[in-house]
Amino acid sequence: MYHSEQIIDPQLFDNEAFTQALSQTKQPISLFREALLKGRDTLYARFEATKSANEVVHQRAWLIDQILRQAWTLFHFQTPLALVAVGGYGRGELHPSSDIDILILSQDDLKEQTQEELQKFVTFLWDINLEVGSSVRSVPECVEIAEKDITVITNLIESRLLIGESKLFEELQTLTSSDKLWRDRIFFEAKMNEQRQRHLKFNDTAYNLEPNIKEGPSGLRDLQTIAWVTKRHFGTGVLYDLVKYKFLTEEEYKTLLECQSFLWKIRYILHKITNRHEDRLLFDYQREVAKILGFKEDDEHMDVENFMQHYYRTAREITVLNEMLLQHFQEEILHDGPTEIKPLNSRFQICNEFIEVVHDKVFERYPFALLEIFLLWQYHPEIKGIRASTGRLIRRYNKLIDQAFLRDIRARSLFIEIIRQPIGVTHAFRAMNRYGILSAYIPSFGKIVGQMQYDLFHVYTVDQHTLFIIRNLRRFAIEKHSHELPKCSEIMQNLHKPELLYLAGLFHDIAKGRRGDHSELGAKDAFDFCLAHGLSGTDSRFVSWLVQNHLVMSTTAQRKDIADPDVINAFAQQVEDIRHLNYLYLLTVADIRATSPKLWNYWKASLLYNLYSRTKQALLNGLQSPIDKRVKIHDLQNHALELLIPEDRIKAKELWNAIDDDYFLRATAANVAHETQAMLHKPSDSPLVLIRHSKEGGVTEFLIYTEDKESLFVDTTYCLELQHVNIVDAYIITTANRFTLVNYTILEEDNSPIANNERAENIRKALEIAVQETQPIKPINRLWARFLKYFPVPTRVIFNIDNKNNQTIMEIITTDRPGVLSRIAQALVNGDAKVKNAKIATFGNRVEDTFVITDKNNQAIRSPEQLDYLQEQLSQLLDNTAR
């Protein structure tokens, strides 16, 4: 606990020398500024020498104490006042840019002359570069506001008299004590609700890739919550007293301090390197913080990944300690009735709605009970959680999970029963992860706990991503969530062995960070685990297959043309039967949705479901009877003819003969009929631009039909990028009658559907103008998203010749940024290449686009010179983009 009077540090601030200098100067502002700068530099040097913030945060508070006291003496107040430190400053904890909050306390309302003098005092503090948050209140006003506002009473709990009338401060403390305001029960419930609401702002997880180390879950605020409740209930600001009250063991107290110390180091560095109050551990700073703290690269992970893994494991410790301590307080403060005991078996009982061991030797005598407790929790959903004392025993005895434990048939049976339960699977696995049971039971899982995936595609650590997948799969199985993804819920609720899907989710990324293909390595781990746990060879191979192929459906949907029956037939051959397809589809959807809250959208949902439904139909037809492309097109054209007026039918057939198959594979009969009619009757001197709305996919399509024009792809992509939309799919068909048909599928820039019909019409008109009037292409230099510069993707261009269709396949991998597609289009024009088809795919910060291109004569580009020139143009236009 901080005690200002116990610190004497003339090197940091010499009170006697400063008082003397102050009496001799006519420029006190300069003197104060110099003292603050000297103190800052002294503290920075001390931190650099020790890499510990434990002392310097208190020393900075002491420095500010001296500065404020000295400044106070320069002013003469006619009314008795008290200068009080509140909030974090009141605790005596100041990082380089922490808020310095002060309260100026009076007995009654202030006279005008005193108010003016106080204004001069506060102005003086700002003049000396001391940015304070100040409030001036009378004692009655403080009491009135504190009575209504939990944040105010919390600040006052930590208040500390700096200088002035001690009687005022003592009166305030008396009037705001727990026997007068915010009694224990009310205060505790308010702080718990406050913590819950705060956690929700961060997706209720501490494992975001850019965590807020103060306000986020398992951050410093959670530790402060413990301190606030401790002080309010026990009347002590000394956390060590929690050991005395048996809320913590000595070892747990040591762990708590170590966690706080690590977070303090990070926060101190963040404030120092940003020179501002920055509590977010952004990508911008992670590498530098890792370097300052001495983290090194190893064979499998970068230095920043090792640093962040240490951070996330610290967060897990805080989560467990916070949960355990607050449960102790809950029992101490909220439970005022008799203890209610409900026996469960010879090892466990329910005590006041929490499960606990019947004695503290249970895990020592029956190690398998370390798993049994989670199964019992599933059996009894009325249980609110694991009692704190039992949770402590789980952490102590999880070391008993050794090779003998892993071979114990009872343990293996319990684990499989946990995963087979109809309810509570998500809660069980989350709790098992928090208490270290999952890491001990599956050692390979332990390696991914807190493991950061240093990219913009995954926003959670590997273990949290895995647990989110299991949560998503479980939601498919629960009736009340069926409205979220009805098709997935319908499939899930008809699975015979959903536990196989949960096992696949548990193992799908378990080999992340290891050398080699993580899908193959994880498949082997999954197969061995399943066999060891009594699953049949067939089921074990099935889970292994799901793990090995967990990326295949996503890759097929996003990188291949799923309108092509050949693609569907090939995918159907790969999945073999509808059972494999059902499980793989559910795993893929759950995986994408668990990767990032922003990654899942209507377009991805539509792509995956279309691939699923078309593949299912192919499997129902039989792999020996693959879908025939010509038959499908013939049937669609016949249906479209029926929808046309008789006098248009002959001309329609002539028009269709000039159009490539791709158009018909991607359209419905209604689309073809409507668009054919528009093409046949469009004015000869103007282009045709039509809108297709897709209710199922949430996307909007724009179909352009116009005379062939070399710059058409450049002009139209540039136009759409100026409209701030995201092109998610595109194809271009040059017809035999010298017309070009272009289709763009778009979403808003944030991947939401196009806002309304008016917005869609404005985009249509802009495209109409762009087709007719070639505009000079100016670089789109909108600012990149802040974090893109930390994850650059070097441009790679790969060419392959498709001899069967006499065309060239060009794959481009590069960094996503505004204007990327129009730059690609410009490079293709410069290189005399025509675009026939485009498959747009973005994964976080990484663009992986595929283009089907030909030369001007509609032949595959084979010339090494032309391909080299194309590659040169693409690299120049993409890698030289201004940031």
Image (cartoon, rainbow, N blue to C red):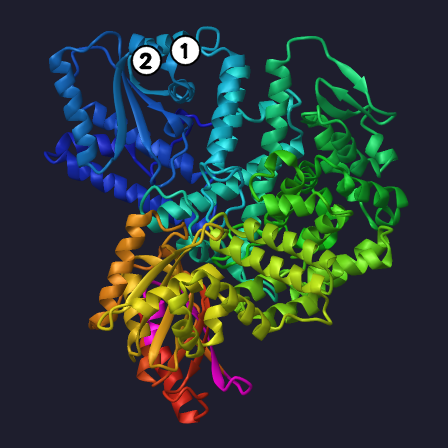
Residue 34's quadrant in the figure?
Answer: top left
Q: Position of residue 281 (x, y in %)?
A: 44, 48
Q: Is residue 814 magenta?
A: yes
Secondary structure under the numbered disc 2 in the rendered image: helix
Q: Residue at x 21, y 27 (%)?
A: 71
Which amino acid type is shown beneath numbered disc 2? Cys
Q: Residue furthest right?
A: 409
Residue to which mark 2 is pinned: 142
Q: Are marks 1 and 2 in contact (CB under 8 Å)?
A: yes
Residue 176's disc number: 1
Neighbor class of circle 2 (other Cα within 10 Å; few <14, some 14-19, many 20+) is many
Left/right of residue 728 with respect to residue 517 in the rendered view = left
Q: Position of residue 606 (x, y in %)?
A: 52, 55
Q: Residue at x 55, y 66 (%)?
A: 562
Q: Is residue 671 above or below residue 249?
A: below
Q: Nearer the viewer, residue 662 or 296?
A: 662
Residue 8's disc number: none
Q: Earlier in the sequence, mark 1 or mark 2?
A: 2
Q: Position of residue 230 (x, y in %)?
A: 54, 21
Left/right of residue 231 with respect to residue 691 in the rendered view = right
Secondary structure under the numbered disc 1 in the rendered image: loop
Q: Is residue 22 above or below residue 445?
A: above
Left/right of residue 212 with respect to residue 308 in the rendered view = left
Q: Quadrant of the C terminus?
A: bottom left
Tell me the magenta residue range. 800-825
Q: Residue at x 44, y 28 (%)?
A: 2
Which amino acid type is shown beneath numbered disc 1? Thr
Residue 170's quadrant in the figure?
Answer: top left
Disc 1/disc 2 C-alpha distance (Å): 9 Å
Q: Is residue 357 magenta?
A: no
Q: Nearer the viewer, residue 801 or 438?
A: 801
